[in-house]
Amino acid sequence: MISNVVTGTTMERLLSYVGPPGAFDEFRASDGTIQPQWHRLLDSLNELSNDELATRQLSANQFLQENGVNITGFDQDRRSLRPWEIDLLPAMFAAEDWDRVHAGISQRARLLDLIVRDLYGEQTALSEGLLPTDLIFKNPEFQRAFHNLPPVSSRLLLYGCEIARSQSGDWWVMADRANAPAGISYTLENRIVLSKTLPQFLRQCQVHRLAPFFMQFHESIKKLSRHRRQNPAVVILSGGPTQPFYFEDVFLARYLGYTLVEADDLTVRKNHVWLKTLTGLVPVDVIIRRYVDQNIDPLEVGGYSPNGIAGLLSAMRHRNVVMLNGPEFGLLDSPVFMPFLPALCRHFLGEELLMPSIATWWCGQKEAFEHVTSRFDSLVVKPAFAHSGGQEYVVADLSDEQRQQLLQKLKSRPWQFVAQERIVRSAAPCWIGKHFQPGYLALRTFAVRKEDSFEVMNGGLIRVETSPGPMPLSISAGQCSKDVWICSNKPVPAVSLLARIQEPPKLQRSNNRLPSRAADNLYWLGRYLERLEFAGRLIRKTTERMLSETGQQAMLDVFPMISCLAEQGVVEESLCLDDFFPAREHIESMWPKIVCGQESQGNFRDLCEQVIRIASLVRDRMTEDFWRAIQQMRQTIRPSQDMTLSDVQNLMNSLMLQISALSGQISDGLVHGPTRHFLLIGRSLERARQLGLTLRHFLKDLDDRDVIPIVTLLDVCNSIMTYRSRYRANFAVLPAFDLLVTDSGNPHALIFQFNELRRLLAELPYKDKRRPLVPPEWGSVRELRFEVQSLLPTSDRQPNWSDYRPALEELLDSLDERINVISNQLTSTFFVLAEFHQQV
Amino acid sequence: MRYRVTHITRFDTADRVSIGMNQVYLTPRQTPHQTVEHTRLTTDPATTTFDRRSDYYGNIVHFLSFERGYEHLEIHASSRVDVKKPDLPEPADSLPWDEVVAAVSQEPCPFDFQTREMQAASPCVDDLADLIQPTAHKLFPTGEPVLVGLKRLLAYFATEYKFDSTATTVNTPTSEVFKKKRGVCQDFSHLAIALCRAVDLPARYVSGYIRTHPPEGRPRLRGADASHAWVSVFCGPLGWVDCDPTNNCFLSDEHITVAWGRDYADVAPVKGVVIGSGSHGLKVSVDVEPIGESTSDLPVAS
């Protein structure tokens, strides 16, 4: 807790901030004066009241949440998503101070690049004894298959450097990240949030922009491409939505305008890499690798893993594709190289290492091991070869027994461990709970290749921890994040990646680079959204009936709705039994749990989460608004205790509104072309299926003269308004069923879905070679369409219900199965390129 | 001794494979005791891409792709090699194994520094020190000449292990071979490597072929031979000395070396990825034919 609760203006509160003892204070110099780079921020803050700052803090985090900025991926446990949070108060650094960081990191990137080249090439670092041989030969990350990959095919493009400031104010490197450095998108997202919430601050403080860094990123990719340098085909290879930093991959793909792919989307033919799209194979020139596993080529690396792209390394050896960063660079992410960098720097660059690493000892060396055991308690022990930190032991915090165990492990396989000095990181004021409190800083910044050197970002990503202990190196650790402001002495010119005039692109009418996998996901998104909408309407109507009526007779229409939901597993089968009416009160009390409870699988909440999950798979193809609507949905279905029937009703009302917003987005917001087509095909097909199911359940025990079920049916099928406009309040079976089945003017009628499917399929990009004269799915749709039309007599005779009903019932009985057939046909025509690999 | 080696690998698939890729180690490399006079690698169907390169260990590896699909695939590797018996001193006269280890571990390494790579655990040869160290030290008592130690290692396999092709699969861990005392040449080689590495003696895996002798009075069967594997152990000034734990012998002129690496995973003869479903039947036939012996009338192995 804060001892002295300060009141007053925001600036006064910041002025009274006191840094913690024992740590370098970023805010005040040792003589107590405020560091000059904070002055402008103080001036800006002066214009902002406490409450205003609090409001903006809230809106910043809300913005992040609405944009779905989160840390963990979509794994099995979908509830483990953690939102990204930001502290509005940036950390200020003077440009002169940053120049030293810049020089140090740029040199380090050059050095690490050369080290990797050497280790996977001539190995002079080993033959000349600059690195102990065991460090490489006992290192499980050292992959012989990467030996002698041509440098032009495998480059270090982006290097991430984790730094901290020690008590003396010197910068130390805590970790190197060259595999697929995380954090670059979060850095950008933080800056976007601050420029939205504190726009005038950035100007007043003369903060260096991030855009030049990304322009260089973009530029270097073009330069490094071996083909079509003006407009190379660039893909971002992601590990997919189960990976922790999937958000970053999506963000980068959108920001830079590259296609986001997973390993399955790529294939190697004739030693070239190709993207599998709906219209066939499209060549790939550059792969930006965000895929962190080493198993990138099942033929050569990683034993029997089915992942990766078979033949990729061969394509790289033929210089037909460029990978950025190359797979070899993952080697550098482990801390074991740190003790040897000064000597390696003299060897490779003929320079002294400018920015020291945190003091590190590799226990695989005898003297180092002895040193480590002699002052064990003051150190942190961690795996020597682990990619991203791994299990860390703060020796001083261990019990005697744990300490002995660790020592034992160290003695039996010393080469598997490094020990590092503990440092107290520098601290800066953080706006926590309306007060400025000290937070300890971990800073990650990035360098991007520019010809043969590296440019360092004028900014970075700070993670804050309020306790002074060691902080894990992953960017997902820490209580919140902060933006890094490098303040210039003069105004900073505005640049933006978007504002830059490029080579004018050639005019294009369509983009057929839709990966087959994405098409598959879009199709299922369309289907699930429609399924959700139908289930939502049925539940809402059921709830409404439960709330309004009491008599048993009046509930006749509830039964078909519940049995329809039960057939799809949204509610339990047992609810449809005859004891429904006797047990009605019990069921009503259970209803909110049945619908929204977290326990029941397949219920409405589960369906919602399915939709969110599938949407996340195609997030890179959606508009921002679409994603925001999905995020809102996530908020709406958040679990809450003790819901009543009317809470369910309200929840359904807001969800239906959000779903129709999504539907509207699909109809209008997306570009035309395959992306939208597959969504719409999924939607029409599912709508036909849902209509069929609902009609079948209502028909089962329908008494022609009973009006209530008809009204309910029209309502849940979204056609009550259309009915009223045609027949006023004259409800009768034939006009109602005609409207829902055979009226081609009603977008919610069965026939309309088949007309729509016919139209959509005709516009799909069939690949000539694969297209039979009449694709099977066309035939299936045509047949169904014909059968629905035949429900009405061909001549001018008026249809009558006694003919209509049995024919309709017969059609509905087979409908589900036939829609399934169409779905399978679509899969084999379009989505099968998502091939099946196996190892022999 | 000169040999003509033919190694035929045949895949039969239930459903047509639409694309197949293979990485194969089927071409013998040059060694101090082996001259490769001629090699040839052909396939049916023909390859779409065919690449030959030298790998990290200097072995010859081929990358093959078949992009027009196939139902059957045959990879046909043949070569003509001349093998000489290595000269080895009397085992008792060789350097003590612990002096070899001490020399290899010196800074800077007085031998090729890459020798040290073969002291470390590898994908198929886990670090089993805790399990096998007592056995390893029994086989290599302090001060024992290294070749005497190796002889004891070979005898250990000959007496305590039983060749049994049903006991293990490609994925059986070495620790299990140690416990079961059964396996095939690959298992014995991995375990022999583990035992050497347990006392820090560099040891590597060699893949190749061995000449087989038909039973007394019977003709040799063509195609009845098989891929073989053995180990090579670093013996200081003697260099790498090959020995065969499956056959309890040092190499004479009856082993043909194809490739070496840390273990089987580095030099698996045929690895592949196919696109398409269905199961695969794999048939391998190897023929090691001493040149000079008439072979044309020999019966063919079924």
Image (cartoon, coloured by chain):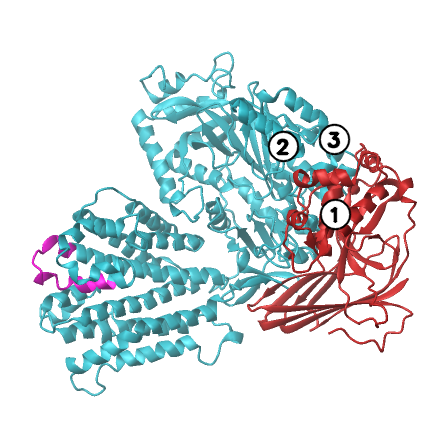
Chain colours: A cyan, B red
Q: Which of the chains bears the disc numbered 2?
A: A
User: Counting other residues with Cα less than 10 Å from the Cα at mark 2, is it few (<14), some (14-19), or many (20 or more)?
Assistant: many
What main secondary structure does the magenta stretch of the protein show? helix
Query: In the figure, residue B259 lies in which quadrant?
Result: bottom right
Identify the disc placed on residue B192. Answer: 1
Q: Nearer the viewer, residue B200 or A295?
A: B200
Residue A499 is situated, as x and y percent measured from the top left of the image, at 48, 46
Q: Residue at x 84, y 39 (%)?
A: B111
Of circles 1 and 3, which is in front? Answer: 1
Q: Which residue is mark 2?
A: A417
Q: CA distance from mark 1 to mark 3?
A: 42 Å
Secondary structure beneath disc 2? strand
Query: Is residue A559 on the magenta stretch?
Result: yes
Q: Quadrant of residue B219?
A: bottom right
Q: Quadrant of the C terminus of chain A?
A: bottom right
The three-letter amino acid code for the residue at tag 1 is Ala
Circles 2 and 1: CB distance less than 8 Å?
A: no
Name the side, left or right, on which A159 lies relative to A436. Answer: right
Q: Which mark is residue A477?
A: none
In this figure, which residue is indicated by the disc labeled 3? Answer: A346
Which chain does tag 1 point to?
B
Q: Give the residues in magenta.
A: A544-564
